[in-house]
Amino acid sequence: MRAIVKAERLEKVYRVGKVDVPALRGVSLEVEEGELLAVMGPSGCGKSTMLHLMGGLLTPTSGRIVIDGEDMTAASDAKRTDIRRRKIGFVFQRFNLFPTLTAEGNLRLAERIHHNGADDPARRREILRLLRLEDKMHHKPLELSGGEQQRVALARAVVTRPSIVLADEPTGNLDSENSAIVLKMFQELNYRFNQTIIMITHNPEAASMCRRIIQMRDGQIVEPNAGV
């Protein structure tokens, strides 16, 4: 197997007024292609900062991030955007769905942005079916429950089949039924399409379905090789 994500000695310091607040303190991590990885730790330990750095949404204070052989740290803003568009799907607690578009319309827009106008109705239907949304495909976000909106947001993130899926507490606001659907979907994507999934979670049940678990504390990885 090859490492599709490499983080090397990542440091991230936020400036709050006149005070420097370190969020990451020399984090190094390799994630293999096709790995399903959980990142756990208390609030404020640096989990989300690490995920945002991996996705090129933040720039490290020092250190390096390599995504599928491409150095995100050295890349221009335009190049980082291109890497994200081609290789990374994001799942956040905030849905950020387009309210005027249906569930299928949100997925279609993602396809067009990521694949230069591509239109694949069969793929959209497959993803919506896996997330038990086939009967909601023509509904707009305000016509869906919170759990259904989160599942549409997940579908939008993965419909383009990115090599890497970065998920920040994807089940944090969901009930047990919706959480189970989302987690099963992650397992299906990982198994069928060999997608690399890195998931931040506080939920031990969500972590238990991953192949590897790392623990973070105070901006550092404290148990890099913990597994299930």
Image (cartoon, rainbow, N blue to C red):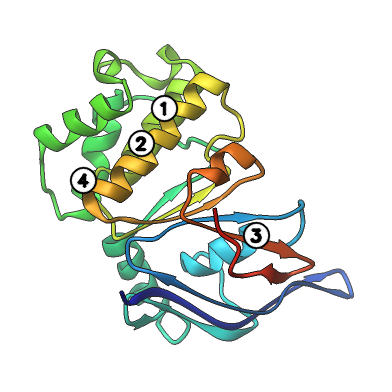
* Closer mark to the observer between disc 1 and disc 4: 1
In the displayed structure image, the side of residue 207 where residue 119 appears, left or right: left
**Which kind of residue does numbered mark 3 sit on?**
Lys
* Closer mark to the observer between disc 3 and disc 1: 1
Question: Which residue is depicted at the point 30% across and 55% down?
Answer: 195
Quadrant of the image occupied by residue 164: bottom left
According to the picture, the residue beneath numbered tag 1 turns out to be 181
Q: Distance of mark 1 from mark 4, alpha carbons?
A: 23 Å
Residue 85 in percent (x, y) is at 30, 60
In the displayed structure image, the side of residue 160 where residue 7 appears, left or right: right
Quadrant of the image occupied by residue 141: top left
Q: Nearer the viewer, residue 23 or 177?
A: 177
Badge 4 marks a residue whose secondary structure is helix
Which residue, as the protein is rendered here, is positioned at the far right?
Answer: 18
Q: Residues within 10 Å of mark 3 (few under 14, many from 20)?
A: many
According to the picture, the residue beneath numbered tag 4 turns out to be 111
Q: Nearer the viewer, residue 34 or 70?
A: 34
Mark positioned earlier in the residue sequence (2 or 3):
3
**Which kind of residue does numbered mark 4 sit on?**
Glu
